[in-house]
């Protein structure tokens, strides 16, 4: 009877019938403590692997700088200096955090940040066409040509404009000593640009040369149809910035970003001395003036400066402009895992956490490459971590270093996070009102997240009533499920950063049938399924300092009376052996990193 009554009630609600596995984020953003020893074993393993890598003969002329930063502090650095230098122009022979590289296309993130600032200031709109800011495009006849009036700044920044990749770069006529040797026909140079790569990089292209050339070009795709990488998007966004600010691009970057963030080694201009210049043997690009191409790839910077920039992004990405979360994808790239943001290259993988754990981890990255300089920045917003890799030398180092550092780092971070979640949240809580028979128990593991194991409300086992009904809606009643908490990253008291608000979700466990079913992975997230007397039924508020959890719709406050035993309590059993792979368990320490300070992580508030 009770079951039927509940079912009738619930079936009138618009539940999704989708299977949403493994909610993400699964934990609040960690605040890694400065000087914390927690990650040291992982960094030691990374150093060992990097030393083996750098020792290879093919990397004799390669230098690199790597930094990992939290939201607040640089946590780890590693520098390697090439064993061989150019005897007449060695540059920096002792690479450290101040050593300067060309960061190439990472420049695009700075150009985009400038556009976001101008959007926030009301000086331009992301959703206005580029023709509003570049007079040459204002009355372009678009028949067969690029439809500039349909190309907004937002879709340019998102690599969705459909315009060609280059003007003045990547033309094989300049790169191949003899094009006919690879089967290309002999051709003359009439009508080709006469600047930059077409002129041995001795003279950069001008604005007029760029715009005249673009007026003749045809699109690859209709605007907003399909993403494809284009340097031109950012060269034009640089011109848009100059148009609305009335400043030279370089001047604007200094005023709006480099100076405020104290990026003292960062510039659009070649440093006046080679003292900190990383100059791999055979390089020539250090000296190249990129001219009109600057907003797409000209910045010089150090890894220490880049850590400052990453800290800024990690703490402001959702507060830069109304309506913009800078980390969000704007379009998919190829495959299941890759997306373009503005102008981020976003990777989401369920392979990194190891067997039995398919929770996706998101990496928001931007890579850069010009001859002999290769780089990537990676933001891991769930973990509150940012990674910089700068290389002067061999390109192949980049992906090798990326794999080593991110895999070790994320797996080690997961172990620390779940160990501390276990220590902080899990255990048995009972009603602070002694006349009320209400209690709950929480357990946790990396693969299941923070889960509710039992919930008695006023002598009723909610697992057999309401939660069972939630689980049954749209699913096979017998299919296994768990009740998992997902943090909202909001607080009841935002000022004090206290009273963490979490939502409880009924999460289906993957079954063998799910592995085989094509549609099992289709999911429409809905974390607000029902309320009781207008309060969300699945809201739980953790007052960590007091060891209290509140369930507002249930009108109950419960205080911790016993710690978790680390085994997930009664009915557990999935927890053992399914932690992340490849990382040794570390000795138990008392929680320190998760402690909130009054320097809040609130990227949605400036
Ligand atoms: C910016 O572009 C608009 C539209 O083409 C033009 O009217 C204006 O003069 C330009 N401003 C500057 C400072 O170049
Ligand atoms: C908006 O544009 C005006 C005029 O170009 C400029 O003076 C002002 O600094 C810009 N605002 C911001 C926040 O950059
Ligand atoms: C700016 O950065 C430099 C190092 O590049 C540092 O010495 C200085 O203290 C920083 N200034 C501020 C205000 O943080
Ligand atoms: C070494 O530097 C000199 C400039 O000082 C340059 O002319 C030469 O090409 C460089 N050689 C190599 C192999 O990089
Ligand atoms: C507990 O349940 C009883 C009925 O079994 C009810 O009378 C009482 O009001 C409930 N109290 C609370 C606080 O839910
Ligand atoms: C509280 O309620 C549960 C579920 O009905 C019951 O098993 C338990 O014995 C009750 N505890 C007390 C102290 O009454
Ligand atoms: C939030 O916390 C601050 C600092 O502890 C306190 O002064 C304030 O009253 C709290 N606000 C609310 C709404 O409880």
Image (spheres, rainbow, N blue to C red):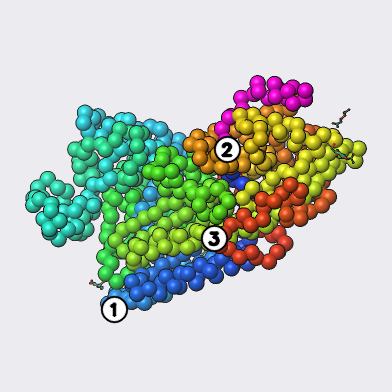
Q: Is residue 446 above or below residue 510?
A: below
Whether disc 1's CB lies below 8 Å from ligand 4 is answered yes
Q: CA distance from mark 3 to mark 2?
A: 27 Å
Residue bearing mark 2? 20
Cα distance between the residues tagged 2 and 1: 60 Å
Say what secondary structure mark 2 lies in. loop
Query: Residue 409 — which label?
Result: 3
Residue located 26% across and 65% down the image:
284
Measuring 40% from the left and 75% from the top, which residue is drawn there?
55
Q: Quadrant of residue 2?
A: top right
| Residue 419 x, y percent position in the rendering | 67, 57
Residue 503 in view: no
**Magenta highlight range:** 1-21
The reply to whether discs 1 and 3 touch (Cβ–Cβ < 8 Å) is no
Q: Which of disc 1 and disc 2 is earlier in sequence?
A: 2
Ligand 3 neighbours mark 3 (CB distance < 8 Å)? no
Disc 1 designates what residue? 87
Determine whether the residue tagged by mark 1 lies in a helix, strand or loop: loop
Mark 2 or 1, closer to the camera: 2
**Could you classify mark 1 by the number of other residues whose Cα lies within 10 Å: few (under 14), some (14-19), or many (20 or more)?**
few
Q: Is residue 9 magenta?
A: yes
| Residue at x 58% of width, y 63% of height | 583
Left or right of 286? Residue 384 is: right
Marks 1 and 3, how far apart at CA:
37 Å
Query: Residue 513, position in %: x, y?
Result: 55, 39
């Amino acid at each position: 009877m009770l079951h039927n009554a509940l079912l009738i009630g619930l079936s009138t609600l618009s539940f999704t019938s989708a299977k949403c596995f493994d909610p993400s984020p699964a934990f609040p953003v960690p605040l890694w403590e400065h000087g914390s020893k927690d990650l040291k074993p992982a960094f030691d393993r990374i150093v060992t692997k990097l030393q083996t890598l750098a020792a290879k003969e093919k990397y004799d002329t390669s230098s690199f700088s790597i930094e990992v930063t939290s939201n607040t502090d640089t946590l780890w650095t590693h520098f390697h200096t090439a064993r061989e230098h150019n005897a007449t122009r060695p540059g920096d022979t002792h690479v450290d955090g101040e050593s300067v590289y060309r960061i190439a296309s990472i420049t695009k993130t700075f150009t985009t940040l400038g556009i976001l600032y101008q959007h926030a200031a009301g000086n331009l709109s992301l959703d206005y066409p580029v023709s509003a800011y570049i007079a040459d495009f204002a009355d372009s006849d678009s028949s067969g040509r690029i439809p500039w009036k349909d190309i907004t700044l937002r879709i340019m920044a998102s690599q969705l404009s459909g315009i060609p990749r280059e003007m003045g770069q990547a033309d094989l006529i300049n790169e191949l000593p003899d094009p006919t040797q690879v089967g290309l026909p002999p051709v003359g140079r009439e009508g080709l640009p006469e600047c930059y790569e077409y002129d041995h990089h001795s003279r950069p292209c001008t604005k007029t040369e760029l715009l005249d050339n673009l007026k003749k070009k045809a699109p690859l795709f209709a605007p907003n149809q399909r993403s494809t990488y284009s340097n031109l998007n950012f060269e034009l966004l640089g011109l848009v910035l100059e148009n609305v600010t009335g400043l030279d691009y370089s001047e604007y970057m200094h005023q709006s970003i480099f100076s405020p963030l104290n990026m003292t080694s960062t510039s659009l201009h070649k440093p006046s001395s080679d003292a900190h210049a990383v100059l791999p043997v055979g390089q020539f690009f250090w000296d190249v003036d990129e001219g009109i191409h600057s907003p797409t790839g000209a910045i010089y910077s150090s890894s220490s400066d880049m850590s400052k920039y990453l800290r800024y992004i990690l703490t402001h990405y959702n507060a830069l402009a109304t309506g913009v979360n800078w980390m969000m994808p704007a379009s998919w790239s190829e495959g299941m895992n890759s997306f373009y943001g503005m102008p981020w290259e976003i990777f989401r993988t369920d392979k990194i956490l190891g067997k039995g754990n398919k929770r996706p981890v998101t990496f928001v990255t931007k890579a850069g490459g010009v001859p002999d300089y290769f780089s990537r920045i990676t933001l891991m917003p769930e973990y509150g971590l940012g990674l910089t890799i700068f290389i002067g030398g061999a390109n192949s180092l980049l992906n090798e270093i990326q794999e080593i550092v991110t895999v070790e780092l994320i797996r080690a971070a997961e172990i620390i996070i779940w160990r501390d979640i276990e220590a902080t949240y899990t255990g048995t809580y009972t009603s602070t009102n002694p006349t009320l028979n209400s209690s709950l128990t929480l357990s946790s593991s990396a693969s299941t997240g923070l889960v509710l194991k039992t919930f008695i409300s006023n002598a009723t086992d909610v697992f057999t009533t309401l939660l069972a009904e939630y689980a049954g809606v749209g699913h096979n009643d017998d299919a296994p499920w768990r009740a998992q908490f997902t943090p909202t990253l909001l607080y009841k008291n935002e000022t004090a950063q206290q009273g963490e608000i979490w939502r409880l979700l009924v999460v289906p466990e993957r079954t063998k049938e799910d592995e085989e079913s094509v549609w099992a992975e289709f999911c429409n997230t809905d974390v607000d399924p029902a309320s009781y007397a207008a309060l969300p039924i699945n809201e739980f508020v953790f007052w960590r300092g007091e060891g209290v959890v509140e369930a507002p719709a249930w009108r109950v406050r419960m205080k911790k009376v016993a710690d978790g035993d680390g085994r997930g309590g009664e009915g557990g059993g999935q927890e053992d052996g399914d932690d992340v792979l490849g990382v040794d368990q570390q000795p138990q320490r008392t929680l320190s990193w998760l402690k909130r300070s009054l320097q809040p992580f609130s990227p949605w508030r400036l």
